[in-house]
Image: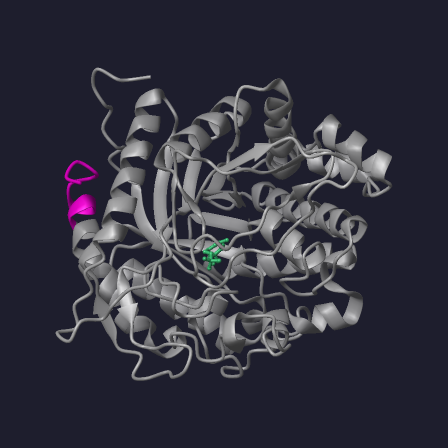
Amino acid sequence: MEHKQLKAFPKDFLWGSASAAYQIEGAYREGGKGLSVWDKFVRIPGKTYEGTNGDVAVDHYHRYQEDVELMAKAGLKAYRFSIAWSRIFPEGNGKVNEEGVKFYDDLINDLIAHNIEPVVTIYHWDLPQALQDAYQGWESRKIIDDFVNYAKTLFEAYGDRVKYWVTLNEQNVFMQHGYLMASHPPAVTDPKRMYAANHIGNLANAAATKYFHEHHFQGKIGASFAYSPNYAVDADPENQLAADNAEQMNAYYWMDVYAYGRYPDVVRQWQIEQGIAPEIKPEDTELLEDPHSRPDFMGLNYYQTNTVQANPLKDGVGLAAENTSGKKGTAQESGIPGAFKSAENEHLQKTDWDWNIDPIGLRIALRRINSRYHLPVLITENGLGAFDTLEADHEIHDDYRIHFLREHVKAIHDAISDGVQVIGYTTWSFTDLLSWLNGYRKRYGFVYVNRDEESEKDLARYPKDSFYWYKQVIATNGEDL
Ligand code: BGP
């Protein structure tokens, strides 16, 4: 609907940017850190783009002060970053590594000294390898206690200063890539194991959230979900049903559990028929449905929408790997036989990695979350992965990124005017960083980092045009786009 007048962004709106430990820190064997599953996975030939890894990444571990300085220059109100579990507990559990605790303590203090609100992600995919070796990580219920213990250690160490906590980042992504597509660790392709591990992930998430609420830490906690709203390719009821299947299987299946503690019946029934349903014990339901396990907000990572159509059960299209080449138009059809498969959306442009560019989709995502879950939304990721050119004068003219972000900020403004409560927007990403599967050339940052796949070069930081644009947006609280 069109509004006669737009509502203003809330005064305390968290304009910010985001990152994740593995993608920026480097120093993978320094400061007493243990190895994570990603430290090992990237060494398997063919798994990442040209064998790229985060050993050095963008060296944020040694340059965090310079990075925070740049955030302050941009006027950031919030910075979302993740903590590497293996820096706090090199073995995943047991003895705390004080050097790791101190690193994030210093970072948090530095952010606060610059009036930047820290938003801490507890888990952004870098599971301690020791827990994978000891009991197969997310496939064992033993992880629930270890995850709560890790989260509790963070709440106790930083809870006096950190007011926003993200428990799990994109559980749907790391579970599906890890256990269905073998494109993340532990590189499994087994739907039954995926749903079993995912259920344990839900229990760990609920238990940590419950602990946080029961111990009256001041602040808000929630998971960040990668939600790509699904459209039907046309008005054919078969395709509309396919879009509903995709929403149920790819979105409600996670968000319903966070918000209500239960799985959608449609997916549960389908899993039983396929023989891949996770075991749900009565005490699991009790934990998931406990009011203390409810999130205070829904974290939303929004990049794109999906358009789908019907897909037959017999000889239907299965899951395909993503385009990691950066060559537009090379993405394959992908789907779940009997449920849905991808379709082209002629109304949308695409990025070089074939991600649909759809700002209105963000407004739709916010409205759907609002009407189904009645929770405030913290947009924890949104951004454009693109090739950037560093000019001779060290400028980067990323007008395409400014255009992308501007249109998405407008969509948020519209959603706020629709009545959705949006508490913040931390774009992906502040500096350029390592893309898990796409190397260093798929850049998202406001700040260019001078390195590529071949060489670490000097890792110098150069603000892009989008940096100055965002600074203006923040200074005017979203009025001047
Ligand atoms: C999200 C992850 C981020 C980041 C982003 C961009 O799924 O939470 O860590 O990587 O996507 O994705 P990509 O690097 O694949 O372009």
Residue 47 can be seen in this image: yes
Residue 148 x %, y %: 65, 55
Name the residue rendered at 77%, 57% in the picture.
139
Name the residue rendered at 45%, 44% in the picture.
219
Name the residue rendered at 59%, 46% in the picture.
333
Residue 350 on the magenta segment: no
Residue 305 x %, y %: 47, 38
**Residue 68's image quarter?**
bottom left
From the viewer's perspective, is 383 left or right of 259?
A: left
Residue closest to the eye, 269 or 159: 269
Quadrant containing the C terminus is: top left
From the viewer's perspective, is 239 left or right of 6?
A: right
Residue closest to the eye, 14 or 185: 185
For residue 234, above or below residue 359:
above
Residue 480 on the magenta segment: yes
Residue 53 can be seen in this image: no
For residue 156, above or below residue 218:
below
Residue 422 x %, y %: 37, 33
Name the residue rendered at 48%, 42% in the picture.
299
**Residue 339's image quarter?**
top right
Instruction: Tell me the magenta residue range.
Output: 472-481
From the viewer's perspective, is 69 left or right of 264?
A: left
What is the magenta segment's predominant secondary structure?
loop
